[in-house]
Image (spheres, coloured by chain):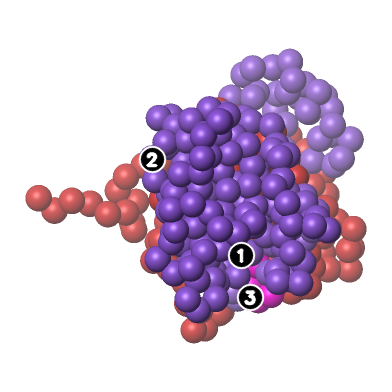
Amino acid sequence: MNRQLAHLSDEALVALAARSEQSALAELYDRYGRTAYGLAFRVLRDQALAEDAVQEAFLTVWRTASRFMPERGKASTWILTLVHRRAVDTVRREQRRRADSLELADEPAVEGVEEDAFLHLQRERVQAALRHLPDAQREALELAYYGGFSQSELAERLGQPLGTIKSRMFGGLSRMRELLGEPGTETSWTPTT
Amino acid sequence: MDAHDLTAAYALDALAPDEAEAYERHLSQCEECREQLAELNETATALAFATVAPAPPARLRASILDAAAAERTNVVPSRRRRWVTRGLAVAAAAVACIVVGLAVSLSQSSHPQPISASLVLGPNRTGSLHISGLSAAPHGKTYEAWVIPAGHSPRPAGLFPGGASTIVHLRGTVPPKSVVAVTLERAGGVKAPTTTPIFSAPT
């Protein structure tokens, strides 16, 4: 695997991809392909559909890299937003799979998965933050983000007014933001000296 | 509908298409929402890192890169080997360097897979060539990079063995309006090119 671009920032890689540098696209995939696929698979519960969503998202990166604006947000956020949007569009088309994703809302056990330490820590950190949310907020975030349900569908499904759903989503994300930005949650590293 | 309170739903992709369009129209006029969306979008994306899933199949990486190559290629196949003088527009990139797409000329029989090459120019006119798809040099041969300043003879700028993906840091500087080229030479390199360039481009 070519990691000669490993020292460049994500944003620099996007700039190189905008100049048709394929190795920059490869490096971005090596950094985020696994997370992208994990996300698409979680939403779609189907290997072939997840592969399609990831492929289309990375090709959108390739096609539109020159329009990426680093001052508007991180490149990783941009890439994973493209993956998520594509996966949600697909799951909304494939009505049949919607019920599955609800029933399988718990994390599947994946044994023997190799992954790097960074991804492992990152997952622990986000899962810990999710556990700290009030149940109603966590439910709203998970059904919206992983289930692909729109806010109106959530209101109907949960038997709550739309306003309640909106404030659960906003409250949940705001609280997550605090938890993730806050040192001292369970898995964060604390100097001992 | 008050668009202000749709920011979290938009960040989670939880709006119906017509709601999302209305929110995007609002976004173009509301700096406050743009700032809030940037924050909430980053937090929503953190949820992507909480998932547990099998690793993607190895073919997915190859499939993406192949499709990307087929879609927007900077490779210009040519019937005859010749110096190619077409370069893509020069643009400043976010990394404070300049990337120049190189048009690549190659014999199709000796290089079945597409070659792509870019020249990255640093702030002090240093340069590096980023090449992919160039097969490894045959035994007893080496690739040699050249910088050819306008009106001067080619200056040796480094040897490299080729292979799937290579970055060549060019020796010396790359003066404005010079041409950068790569030839196949005997092992150890030569002082002046003896073969037709595999590719070349003006800077």
Name the secondary structure under disc 1.
Answer: strand
Query: What residue lies at 51% left-to-right and 43% top-to-bottom?
Result: B154
In 3D space, how far apart are the residues under numbered discs 3 and 1 (Cα atoms)? 22 Å
Query: What residue lies at 49% left-to-right and 52% top-to-bottom?
Result: B192
Disc 2: which residue: B172
Q: Is residue A181 left or right of residue B22?
A: left
Q: Chain of mark 2?
A: B
In 3D space, how far apart are the residues under numbered discs 2 and 1 (Cα atoms)? 23 Å
Q: Residues within 10 Å of mark 3 (few under 14, many from 20)?
A: few
In this picture, is B21 found above or below A62?
above
Q: Residues within 10 Å of mark 2 (few under 14, many from 20)?
A: some
Q: Is residue A160 left or right of residue B147?
A: right
Q: Which mark sits nearer the N-terminus, 2 or 3? A: 3
Q: Are marks 2 and 3 in contact (CB under 8 Å)?
A: no
Disc 3: which residue: B58
Q: Amino acid at mark 3?
A: Ala
